[in-house]
Amino acid sequence: MSKVLLKVSGVSKSFGHVQALKDVNFELNEGEVLGLVGDNGAGKSTFIKILSGVHRKDKGEIIFDGDTVDFSSPSESIEAGFETVYQDLALAPDLPIYSNMFLGREMLRKGILGKLGFVDKDGMRKSVEKNIKKLKATLNHVDQEVGTLSGGQRQSVAITRAVIWGKKVIIMDEPTAALGVEESAKVLEIVKELKQHGITVIFISHTMPHVLEVSDKICVLRLGFTVANLNAAETTYEEVVEYITGARSQIEG
Ligand SMILES: Nc1ncnc2c1ncn2[C@@H]1O[C@H](COP(=O)(O)OP(=O)(O)OP(=O)(O)O)[C@@H](O)[C@H]1O
Ligand SMILES: [Mg+2]
């Protein structure tokens, strides 16, 4: 039996007179991938910014891992086990892959210096190599500067970093939007690999074939409402598009 990891009910959010979210609902089990879809302005980014602690919801309830949560800052969300991979990725281009994995949280080797220890580069490299292998990420060498990587490889760095830090949920806002066919395919492979490792993923995309390929469940937002919660294996491209455009709805009115 899989366990419900995230339950979202009636979440709403306004910015002044603009009501970005009116009623968002879904339920996600541990290790599942949720495709969060909807037209431009439907509320997808606003919703994930509530999960990542950037925005505060006005109403509704979010239960995560058995507890009601209401993050008031990104650090609270990260502490709880969420990691958000944004399009710009927040990586340092001048630093090698392994240092990017530990940005701001360098590993300190325990020694005579105790807590004041020094940065353990070998330990960092080994840990990064192990996790790259585990995720089958297509990265050549941990010493390569991130600025020289392809877009898809940068995604891999950001995702591997989330795995190293033991995150429970990885949120990806349009991870394939700027990527070519081959690079997108690699990102989709990593999403599947994350799932194999029991990590729950929220995947936002306008590319329906990508969403259908990786998702277990699909939540469709329209004008801030959840208009459908679908089982990905039982729906079709056409059906999802009908919900997105408003030709179909699971809710009244
Ligand atoms: N900080 C803000 N202030 C005012 N309005 C906002 C703010 N952020 C989002 N909105 C509005 O909320 C609505 C939802 O926006 P959101 O960015 O969540 O859409 P989206 O589904 O991510 O769209 P896209 O697919 O284009 O990225 C839009 O009408 C947007 O203009
Ligand atoms: Mg968006």
Image (cartoon, rainbow, N blue to C red):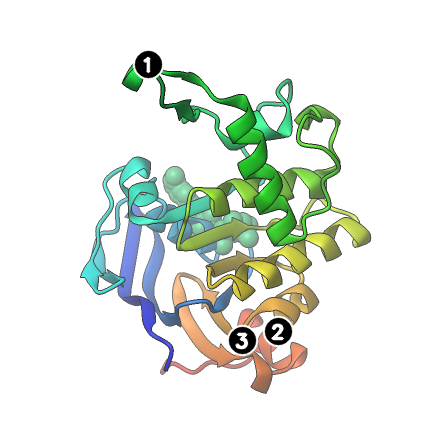
Q: Quadrant of the C terminus?
A: bottom left
Q: Nearer the viewer, residue 150 or 162?
A: 162
Question: Which residue is identified by label 2?
Answer: 241
Q: Quadrant of the N terminus?
A: bottom left
Residue at position x 58%, y 31% from top?
Answer: 125
Apparent side of residue 57 relative to residue 214 in the rendered image (left or right): left
Q: CA distance from mark 2 to mark 3?
A: 5 Å
Secondary element under disc 3, as helix, strand or loop, is helix
Secondary element under disc 2, as helix, strand or loop, is helix
Question: Which residue is identified by label 3?
Answer: 243
Determine whether 47 is above or below 213 in the image. above
Q: Quadrant of residue 5?
A: bottom left
As shown in the figure, which amino acid type bears the numbered disc 1?
A: Ile
Residue at position x 46%, y 52% from top?
Answer: 170
Q: CA distance from mark 1 to mark 3?
A: 62 Å
Residue at position x 41%, y 49% from top?
Answer: 167
Residue 222 appears at what percent x and percent y? 46, 66
Indicate which disc, 1 or 3, sits on the residue closer to the N terminus: 1
- Specify the label residue 112 is tagged with: 1
Secondary element under disc 1, as helix, strand or loop, is loop
As shown in the figure, which amino acid type bears the numbered disc 3?
A: Tyr
